Image (cartoon, rainbow, N blue to C red):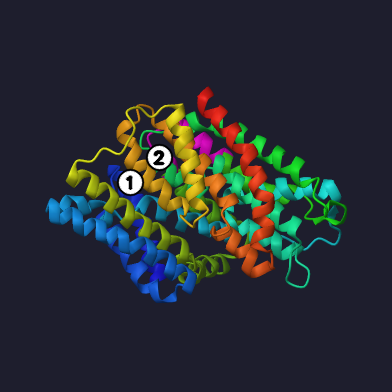
Amino acid sequence: MSGPILFFALLSTIFSQLSSGATTPLAGIAIWTYFLLNLASLNRRQRVQNIAILLPGFALIAYALSKTPNLTLLTPLLNANQLMITLLAAISFLQLTTQLRRQQTSSEGQRGLKQTLLSTHLMASVINVSAMVLVAERLKQEDRLSPLQGLTLLRAFGICAFWSPFFAAMGVTLISAPGSELVKLLPYTLPLGLIALLVSYLQLSRHQEIGHFRGYPISLENLKLPLGLATAVLTTHFLLPDISVIMLVSILSILLVIALLLLRNPLTTAATKFTGHITEGLPNTRGEIALFISSTVLATGTTAVQSALQLDLAPTEFDSIAAAITLTLLVTLSLIGVHPVTSNLVAGATLMPATSDPNLLAITLLMAWSMSSTLSPLAGNQIILQGRYGIRARDLLRSNLPYTLMMLPVCYLVLWIY
């Protein structure tokens, strides 16, 4: 039942946002129900991670209520981060439209690296980590990837967080920095993504395996979906600026999936695939959604304590220097396992009171997410490469640390320019 419950939350949130521009308690209750139904199904690592976030979150909430018994402090818990979870649920449907064929010929050497990096990046910008897994499944030999193949897929995926409207990073950022606007972020973060791709290519092309690298050829067929959907979102946002980007991405993702299923299949087959994803595909997002709910609890607790004790942890002014310090701190925290979802939500709640321009904070949070997901051996995308394809964590860290040290000064420069 958890899949239909989450789909009900998705529809409730979209209807409520379009009709009144507000969140709805019905969706929040449904999301918490989904979370509780799936809690026992989380794997051991996910349970430990969520408990490590939930316990201090609930402790902070209890402490805040003991100081100021004001139940309005719990409002974010009832909302259950429903805008972000609606986005995650909606974009999961895009998996129904994406298929990669096993190529008879591979793309090799530096040309293969370039094509694999670009094609995986563009696909991942829309269907997220699913693209990384799809390409990995086509490249693996005896259920393993080479270190260079793993690094290429990891970079292609992580760089999406700089700019993609379909990435969880953008959704969290727009929520954590209310008032920030996608069209004002992209002129700074999109070029940063291009620089990161170039730096990655130049660095990885000197890898000792490059002569034997076997990649996935770039294909116009595979790029139609990300390019078409990105164009649709940006165009619709220009025409309907009052609808949030998160809602636009959610709505257009669902509509596009329905349209493509009907074009490619008979009505009954399309309906079977769509409902099959509701009952089987949506429960498979339990790991991501549990993390967002747990992070919401911790962010609520942090905000509640600050409010109850009237603490002001933010700097006097959030300028480029403060942004650079924040970025460095968030990336460092990722090395000890703090997920970008958690750190960005808490950072947003703490820093917004001192922020005169939410776009500066938003750019900082996008940078932090991208750099953290690429660097941290404990990030979910790295766990997939380590556990499923035999890539050693130390191999990833050894190559990603120089990349991080090269990209951080570039990020500082972009923050100063902004």
The image position of residue 387, as x and y in percent, is 62, 69
Q: Is residue 89 left or right of residue 187?
A: left
Whether residues under marks 1 and 2 lie with C-beta atoms below 8 angstroms apart, the answer is: yes
| Residue at figure coordinates x 62%, y 46% from the top left | 226
Residue type at mark 2?
Ser
Most foreground residue, 276 or 289:
289
Quadrant assignment for the N terminus = bottom left
Over which residues does the magenta segment extend?
Answer: 231-246
Mark 1 vs mark 2: which is more N-terminal? 1
Q: Is residue 183 above or below residue 208?
A: above
Seen as rendered, the residue at the extreme bottom is: 40
- Of helix, strand and loop, which one carries label 2? loop
Q: In this view, does 242 lie to the left or right of 274?
A: left
Q: Is residue 112 above or below residue 324?
A: below
The image position of residue 214, as x and y in percent, is 82, 57
- Residue 144's image quarter? bottom right
